[in-house]
Image: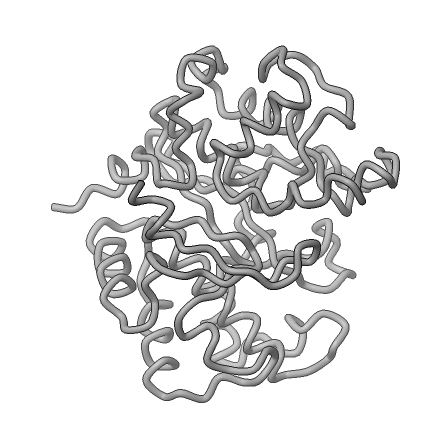
Amino acid sequence: MFDPINHYRQHTEVTLAESYSSQLDNLPNGVEELISIVQNLLIHYQTEKDKLNPDIISIRNIEIDSRCVSLMLKKLLLLDDSGFLNPRPPEKRLLSTCRDFSVLLCSFMRHKNIPARVRYGFAHYQYNDECPMHDHTLVEYWNGTRWLYAESRLNVSPKPLLDVNPSDFPRYLFFSGAEIWKHIRQGTMNERIFSGYRFDDGYGQWIVRNLFFLDLASLAGYEPLIWDSWGILLEEKPGVRVTDVQQLNFLDRMALLDPCLPDECNELITSFNNYSGLSYRGKVHSFSPVSGAYYVDLHAIWSK
């Protein structure tokens, strides 16, 4: 029988940082303590830019394309070779996105034998329900009795959610890709609210589809950059409504599966890996806001 708890204790190629294992052994064991370590190592290149000299952002912005934890840790030691536990000023932290916060936290948790996985979805900007929905990630982990969300960016919210436990983050504040897909397909949420300031239904449906696929990929073993695309994600023009019936039916079926249940999690992973055009073990195209369009061959990188 498939055991998701043991499965998500295992590293992926993205979260594995074997060369730094001895240094990571010194990390604390508690989830909230690990969150604090991540907050000390990373800085968001947009929402925390007021803490940095603009020249630092323009010179080092390529850091947000750090795909794997091993590369993140390498760059962190180049910025400050004293290790990962000492307090760092903002300029000694790695420029990052929410995805990087989540991936690094997930890696630390797995190193500490805590089952964890990165979830992709949506939240109101800075968790302010007066702001638009936008793409977001956080970590889902097993606390010994149930799956909980861990959010590593509450400390930098303009209005910190002081009454919220970052290691037991409320599920009503974050919607996974599957949850949003069900809502827009059932008509209980408007596609348009996921299109940002474009106010376009088709764009909203397209972006929800993309984030749903990224979430599925993460559950299946690859934690992509937010701007990664491959296979069928490249078939439509950006922002154009997805109309392929086979693809829509597949997503509808995946959205009904609960990754917290062993059998359904196994079905989700198996179905994703067997679906034509969804294999991430090849060329992945990235449309980076700082590096532009480029591609990497994951198979070539990971087979070395």
Q: Which residue is drawn at 38% across and 46% down?
A: 301
Towards the viewer: 191 or 247: 247
Question: Between residues 24 and 115, which one lies in front from this camera angle?
Answer: 24
Specify how the rendered protein is coloured. one colour
Task: Tell which residue pokes out farthest to the left in this image.
Answer: 1
Expressed as whole percent of the image width and height from the top left, the position of residue 57 reads 79, 41
Residue 177 against residue 239 in the figure, above or below: above
Q: In which quarter of the image is the C terminus?
A: top left
Q: Where is residue 36 in the image (x, y as percent from the top left)?
A: 62, 24
Q: Where is residue 270 in the image (x, y as percent from the top left)?
A: 22, 60
**Above or below: residue 291 compared with residue 60:** below
Residue 287 in which image quadrant: bottom right
Total numbered badges shown on the rendered structure: 0
The residue located at (38%, 29%) in the rendering is: 110
Taking the image as shown, residue 68 lies to the left or right of residue 204, namely: left
Q: Which residue is drawn at 35% across and 40% down?
A: 12
Query: Which is nearer the eye, 286 or 149?
Result: 286
Relative placement, left or right, of 206 versus 127 is left
Return the x and y of residue 63 as percentages of the image width and height: 65, 41
Q: Residue at x 27, y 37 (%)?
A: 5
